[in-house]
């Protein structure tokens, strides 16, 4: 080893303020690990060891995510039978909305374009067939499903995936240690790396691009929530409307009343969870798809098989040439054939990519094609049946069974979108983009099944208002199309960014994706926007409201965090106070919850001023969400020491993914916290012993290097005394998975350290005295010199959301008898 390298190692050993990578840390004495590097193999053929600082992982403190370990990689390397079973289950969860679209597509299309010739029917059929083939099949099944975040899909999954590769989150709480999570980063391909780095630097440098990207994601999420309102109304009304022509006197008012009754029942059973009836979903939808395919094939061969000419896309041109403006308006009805396509990506976390691909390619796609072709064949002979085309095309003897199955399928389709809305809200809350609400976990086994009461009742009320106000599926369909196309455009933009930044594929291929699919979606968007006055304003109003709520909450949260960072207590100030912190230390453990990942929060100063005494052991607990779906149990918690040892102050960072479930049990939490803290103290003592041993060895290395300058040839490398001769002879053991101690047992015997035993006894005494949860009740106010708009948003809108959301003990399920609060005002 060269003398300069030895001096560099000594410099690293003496450093007490930063990691090797430059990130700051809080601990006085941090764990060390020996990492082996292979360098200069071609020139020297020697193995060099380098000492690197590495964050510890004392992560046994896991109470709140009991099923996480079984969740990771649970769909990898599945057998073919397991994959087929998952494909069957996707019918009931993923394809309910897409499968019920034949109930209303042609009736809506031909309400805008009257059937005057066969060209109208063939053109509309060709348009529907190629729309399904292009967007759900080509775009989602073969491309978008690949852009998943460790098996998770959806708008926020794409955003979190991008956040991992580019630091674009507006909340500045990212740490270098987050990148050590096993699921945080993927292996990147090497081509086009320079372009990807330029995109990454551009996104990180410009705050306007960060805000624009966040607004895009929030808009897509708001559209999905809008889908959760419109899907139940549209599906239920379409299925119930079949009774109009079958029962005398069953008019529009009766359809509305019966639809409202079904919707009330549907939303009332949400609190029981979908797990109670989920085993019925797949068989019912399988039977529904079988009905679609068999009835379609029956009508195709009985009435007019010549509709197969619609495979010729020229009929789309003839359709537009013949109807011009009316044909453009009919695109708003045609887009309804792909409603629910986004669910293939949003519900990916419950299944696998292959299972969703198999189900769509071999069941859903053929059955939908047969259904639409059968309806078109029926319309070729009976064009006057366009208004009730689905039920009129059903054979007489099968009407009532098909009506029952259609109603059940519509309810299942509604259920899938309601559950997707709950999931989107939970992900938004995890990433700091939605006020904290009460979440009820309806399944002990499946962590994705949740129920949010306030959102459920909000959806029910808005669905009832939509049904009662519009009274027909035609106007609701106009609103439905805008929400669906809006979500697809957002997904296209985000997947394009993933292609450029993460996949790093060829620029031409990456641009072909938005040029082809984005152009088709913009054409559909331009068509549905012409119906704003006829119901299209509804999803835009819903999206705008939810976008304002989500962005206001994110904006206020970022300002509050920045204020906490600015006002955090100086370490020098605590050192001046001494280990007593300027007050009396009494036995007990104080858990101070805060959002800072570094530094001492200002609320701690308020506790020092307001309390006559402070606990002998203080733990700053930070619950932090990282942009990954799930944080493994063994990597969830990180401990750091704050201030010197005699202060007995620590920081615990609890890291969660946006799909993680927090199941609070404060008794178990307290017990495991103490156990994990004891492990941290023991390992810290061991690391200090290692550090002292390394210091002595390096001192001897420096002396030998100076003495050997005159006796050792300059071309030779100095062998490090820490490297055993046997290790140098057999380099294969360097790559062994079993760690081998490189220090004598005298260095490793840390249990005899008196300071460790004293600290452990003090910790046990504090635990026996009990735990106290130190919380702040913060009020966020805009500074007096702020703009009027900022004052309006922060002082009124954000303050209203904070007053009406779950905060503090209610959000974390803490025992009220052990809570101490202090008021704080954050000027932002």
Image: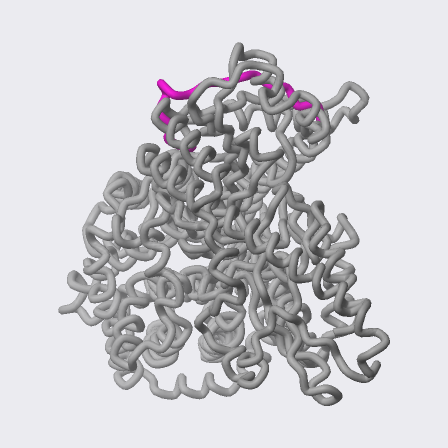
- Front residue of 153 and 404: 153
554 to the left or right of 395: right
Taking the magenta stretch, the answer to whether it contains residue 822 is yes
**Measuring 34% from the left and 37% from the top, which residue is drawn there?**
671
Asked if residue 709 can be seen in this view, the reply is yes
Quadrant where the C terminus is found in the figure:
top right
Q: Is residue 41 above or below residue 368?
A: below
* Numbered range of the magenta stretch: 811-828
- Front residue of 433 and 543: 433
Q: Position of residue 551 (x, y in %)?
A: 62, 40
Asked if residue 108 can be seen in this view, the reply is no
Residue 466: quadrant of the picture: top left
- Front residue of 238 and 27: 27
**Measuring 28% from the left and 77% from the top, which residue is drawn there?**
84
Q: Position of residue 410 (x, y in %)?
A: 30, 56
Residue 432: quadrant of the picture: top right
Q: Position of residue 746 (x, y in %)?
A: 49, 56
**Measuring 20% from the left and 51% from the top, which residue is drawn there?**
276
Q: Is residue 208 above or below residue 814?
A: below
**Measuring 34% from the left and 87% from the top, which residue is drawn there?**
305
Q: Is residue 545 above or below residue 365?
A: above
């Amino acid at each position: 080893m060269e003398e300069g390298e030895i001096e560099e190692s000594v410099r690293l050993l003496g450093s007490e303020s930063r990691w090797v990578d430059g990130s700051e840390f809080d601990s006085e004495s941090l764990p060390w690990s020996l990492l082996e590097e292979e360098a200069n193999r071609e020139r020297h053929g020697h193995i060099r060891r380098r000492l690197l600082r590495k964050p510890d992982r004392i992560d046994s403190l896991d109470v709140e995510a009991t099923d996480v370990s079984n969740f990771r990689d649970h769909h990898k390397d599945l057998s073919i039978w397991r994959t087929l079973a998952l494909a069957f289950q996707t019918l009931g969860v993923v394809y309910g909305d897409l499968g019920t679209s034949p109930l209303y597509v042609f009736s809506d299309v031909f309400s805008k374009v009257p059937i005057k010739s066969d060209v109208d029917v063939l053109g509309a059929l060709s348009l529907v067939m190629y729309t399904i083939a292009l967007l759900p099949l080509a775009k989602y099944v073969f491309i978008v499903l690949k852009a998943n975040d460790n098996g998770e899909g959806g708008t926020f999954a794409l955003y979190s995936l991008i956040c991992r590769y580019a630091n674009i989150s507006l909340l500045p709480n990212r740490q270098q240690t987050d990148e050590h999570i096993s699921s945080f980063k993927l292996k990147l391909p090497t081509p086009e790396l320079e372009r990807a780095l330029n995109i990454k630097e551009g996104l990180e440098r410009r705050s306007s691009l960060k805000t624009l990207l966040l607004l895009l994601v929030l808009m897509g999420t708001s559209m999905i929530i809008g889908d959760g309102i419109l899907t139940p109304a549209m599906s239920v009304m379409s299925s119930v409307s079949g009774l109009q022509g079958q029962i005398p006197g069953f008019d529009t008012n009766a359809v509305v009343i019966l639809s409202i009754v079904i919707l009330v029942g549907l939303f009332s059973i949400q609190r029981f969870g979908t797990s109670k009836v989920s085993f019925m979903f797949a068989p019912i939808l399988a039977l529904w798809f079988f009905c679609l395919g068999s009835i379609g094939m029956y009508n195709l061969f009985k009435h007019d098989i010549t509709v197969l000419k619609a495979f010729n896309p020229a009929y789309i041109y003839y359709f537009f040439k013949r109807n011009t403006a009316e044909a453009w308006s009919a695109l708003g009805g045609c887009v309804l054939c792909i409603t629910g396509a986004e669910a293939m990506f949003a519900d990916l976390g419950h299944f696998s990519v292959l299972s969703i691909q198999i189900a769509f390619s071999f069941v859903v796609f053929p059955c939908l094609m047969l259904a639409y072709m059968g309806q078109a064949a029926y319309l070729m002979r009976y064009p006057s049946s366009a208004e009730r085309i689905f039920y009129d095309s059903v054979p007489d003897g099968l009407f009532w069974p098909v009506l029952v199955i259609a109603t059940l399928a519509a309810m299942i389709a509604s259920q899938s979108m309601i559950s997707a809305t709950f999931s989107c809200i939970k992900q938004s809350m995890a990433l700091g983009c939605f006020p904290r609400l009460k979440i009820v976990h309806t399944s002990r086994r499946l962590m994705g099944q949740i129920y949010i009461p306030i959102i459920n009742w909000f959806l029910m009320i808005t669905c009832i208002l939509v049904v009662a106000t519009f009274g027909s599926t035609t106007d609701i369909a106009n609103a439905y199309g805008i929400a669906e196309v809006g979500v697809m455009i957002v997904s296209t933009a985000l997947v394009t960014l993933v292609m450029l930044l993460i996949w790093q594929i060829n620029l031409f291929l990456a641009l072909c994706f938005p040029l082809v699919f984005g152009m088709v979606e913009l054409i559909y968007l331009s068509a549905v926007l012409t119906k704003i006055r006829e119901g299209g304003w509804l999803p835009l109003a819903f999206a705008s409201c939810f976008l304002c709520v989500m962005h206001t909450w994110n904006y206020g949260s970022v300002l509050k965090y920045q204020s906490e960072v600015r006002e955090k207590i100086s370490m020098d100030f605590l050192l001046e106070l001494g280990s007593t912190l300027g007050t009396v230390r009494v036995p007990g453990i104080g858990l101070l919850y805060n959002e800072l990942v570094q530094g001492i929060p200002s609320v701690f100063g308020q506790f020092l001023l307001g309390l006559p005494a402070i606990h002998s052991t203080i733990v700053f607990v930070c619950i932090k969400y990282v942009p990954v779906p799930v944080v493994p149990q063994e990597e969830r918690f990180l401990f750091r020491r704050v201030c010197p040892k005699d202060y007995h102050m620590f920081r615990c960072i609890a890291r969660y993914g946006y799909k993680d479930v927090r199941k609070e049990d404060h008794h178990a939490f307290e017990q495991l916290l103490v156990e994990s803290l004891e492990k941290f103290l023991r390992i810290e003592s061991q690391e200090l012993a290692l550090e002292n041993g390394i210091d002595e060895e390096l001192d001897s290395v420096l002396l030998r290097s100076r003495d050997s300058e005159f006796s050792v040839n300059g071309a030779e490398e100095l062998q490090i005394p820490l490297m055993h001769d046997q290790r140098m002879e057999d380099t294969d053991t360097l790559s062994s998975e079993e760690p081998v101690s490189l220090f004598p047992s005298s260095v490793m015997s840390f249990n005899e350290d008196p300071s460790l035993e004293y600290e452990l006894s003090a910790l046990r005494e504090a635990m026996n005295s009990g735990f106290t949860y130190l919380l702040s009740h913060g009020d966020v106010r805009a500074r007096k010199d702020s703009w009027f708009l900022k004052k309006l948003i922060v002082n009124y809108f954000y303050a209203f959301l904070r007053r009406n959301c779950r905060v503090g003990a209610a959000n974390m399920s803490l025992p009220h008898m052990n809570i101490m609060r202090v008021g704080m005002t954050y000027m932002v």
